[in-house]
Image (cartoon, rainbow, N blue to C red):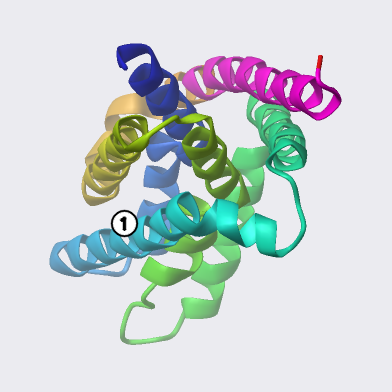
Amino acid sequence: MTELFISALVTFFVVIDPPGCAPIFASLTNTATQAQRRVMAIRATLVAAAVLLFFALLGEPLLKALGISLDSFRIAGGVMLFLIAIDMVFETRTQRREKRADEIAREADGKTEPEDVSVFPMAIPMIAGPGSIASVMLMTARSSGTTETLVVLGALGTILLLTCVSLIAAGPLLALMGRKLEAMITRLLGVILAALAAQFIVDGIKLSFGL
């Protein structure tokens, strides 16, 4: 159980990337008050949690209804996570997030009320994006029994709580970490995610061909 919890915890931490979401949230809410930021951070986390919980519990039946095997989804999800890992190692993922944040910030210029970014783009797709949806479905699919599923959901809840705290403390956290430290951690986590993604692909191929 401990091994499953740690595996799920690392996977969700790498894919959701709470420290990486913090500077994006800070730049998107630079005209909001601290109270408004707190409300948006909590709302973004709750919306993302609802989306991920839906796919964690109903993702497999949904795949069956669409005629997609779980092994095929393992391979597809592994490839998707591997592409995310490459983006993290070469920092293209961070650049895209920052570009998206700048575009939304420019659109909000001139408005008296700060734009509510909790649902879009923070909850979807920054927290509950394709990578995290694929991850939660893959991790719950690997679980055997209710207890292991609850362990995976516990790991997800821990990371979402950490994400919420990171968003609320976005300004001070960014100043404490600094760009260089954030880039180093992101690249290290990218390598770990690449290894996890490769394992998902290998497992999917083995189960598909009965190896």
| Residue drawn at x 47%, y 38% as measured from the top left | 140
Quick check: is 207 in the magenta stretch? Answer: yes
Dividing the picture into quadrants, the one containing residue 114 is bottom left
Question: Which quarter of the image is occupied by the C terminus?
Answer: top right
**Which residue, given by chain and number where applicable, does mark 1 sit on?**
45
- Name the residue furthest left: 35
Q: Residue at x 28, y 42 (%)?
A: 157
Q: Position of residue 109 (x, y in %)?
A: 47, 78
Please tell me whether the stretch drawn in magenta is mainly helix, strand or loop: helix
Q: Nearer the viewer, residue 61 or 192?
A: 61
Q: Secondary structure at mark 1?
A: helix
Residue 184 x/y as whole percent: 52, 17
Give, as a single range, the part of the protein colored magenta. 185-210
From the viewer's perspective, is residue 20 above or below residue 62?
A: above
Residue 161 position within the rendered picture, expressed as x and y whole percent measured from the top left: 24, 43
Q: Farthest residue in the right direction?
A: 209
The answer to whether one can see residue 98 in this image is no
Q: Is residue 112 visible?
A: yes
Residue 164 vertical position relative to residue 6 in the rendered view, above or below: below
Which residue is drawn at the image coordinates 74% and 27% (left, top)? 204
Residue 199 in the magenta stretch? The answer is yes
Which quadrant, please, contains the N terminus?
top left
Total labels drawn: 1
The residue under the point 81% across, 20% down is 210
Q: Residues within 10 Å of mark 1 (few under 14, many from 20)?
A: many
Instruction: Please give left or right for residue 63 compared with residue 111 in the image.
Output: right
Residue 90 percent location from the top left of the image? 71, 26
Where residue 203 sits, quadrant-wise, is: top right
From the viewer's perspective, tell me whether residue 91 is left or right of residue 42: right
**Which kind of residue does numbered mark 1 sit on?**
Thr
Q: Is residue 53 above or below residue 40?
A: above
